[in-house]
Amino acid sequence: MNFVCTKTDIRSPYFDLIQHKSANDWYLYLDEGWTQKENYFYKGFSSSWCKIYFDPIVRIETNKLRDFPIYYNEDSITNFQKLENQVPVDGIVKIDDKIQIDYIPNFYPRITREHQSFKECFDLLYDAVIENVGIFSAHNKKTVYIPQQGGIDTLTVRSVFDFLNVKYETFDLPKDAPSMSKLGTELAKEHWGFQQIKEQDDSVIVTGFYGDEWILRNPYYAHVILSDRGIDITDKFDGIPNCYMKQYFENYRNKCGKPSGIDVETLITQICNDFQIWHVNKTYFLSPLKHISLLTLLSADTQTVIDQVTDAKLSKAIIEKCNPKLLDLIDPLKNQHDPVWFPPSN
């Protein structure tokens, strides 16, 4: 789901992208896997897709929670190489003679100020992941792969696949960093998610990506919420001898020891504009831990926030309901068994 649209006739091969020329003299370069239908190109599935209208006016449309960044300058627009400007997730790109960015009004939701109980947060997360996996599986015909590692987010998603009786195969992460296509190598320079995957044609790789950010386990995001309530997240971690996120929190200790300077509304925009992984060539990715309704978790009651950011209790409750046998596979500590070639934790 990678593209470049430019006024320049780029000499081939350019990351092995396929060139298309429009009637208004713009060139479009696409990776593998796009389907051309009348006046547009399409790639993806229900929860992660991109449609590029090409004649006569270029227009880029995506699912509401776009999975990739969009960069542009005066004569080019792309989603896999940084340029001077970036389009936020609420921006819509059109190109006639010049690049034009329109914005969707009231894009970012307003969340309730009433605190959500653990049960209400559980129901939000359960319904969101069930919906994402259910809609995907109803139309998917590709082979689905899920890593067999013991990360809490991977096992949360895997448990829902089991609960819905959706067929998948497990795979072990390679001991050494996999070789990648030219495009994948370029993407991995700026986006850590692509450093963790092996491209596999005509397959869907299920990920636990976005779990930290969308379900209250990013320590800094939890710090923003808790500090607004007068609670020091560092004190909470220091008061717990052992928990799933204990070691990982040390990467955030200094950052969480200072006032955040942002409010929950700003946090919502950061979460929605956090782009981690998207389809590359004929390898597709499903990341079910991302759903607009999950922003309501930012209103979780204080104990639910603390329990989730320290020990992933909300995620564990989903696994317990959907496939309790997987609870025994959870790593004692986050990222404990990552391959040595994985990038260091943020």
Image (cartoon, grey):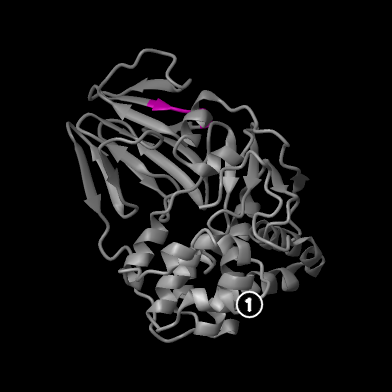
Residue placed most toward the observer, 199 or 90:
199
Place of residue 308 in the rendered image (x, y in percent of width and height, measured from the top left)? 58, 73
User: In this picture, is 133 found above or below 115?
Assistant: above
Asked whether residue 346 is drawn in magenta, I would say: no
Place of residue 125 in the rendered image (x, y in percent of width and height, measured from the top left)? 58, 71
| Residue at image point 39% right, 25% down | 29
Dot 1: what SS?
A: loop
Which region shows up in magenta? 29-33
Q: Is residue 292 visible?
A: no
Q: Amino acid at mark 1?
A: Ile
| Residue at image point 68% right, 57% down | 151
| Residue at image point 23% right, 34% down | 73
Residue placed most toward the observer, 80 or 124:
80
Task: Name the quadrant containing residue 318.
Answer: bottom right
Which residue is disc 1 drawn over?
240
Q: Is residue 50 left or right of residue 53?
A: right
User: In this picture, is 199 found above or below 275?
Assistant: above
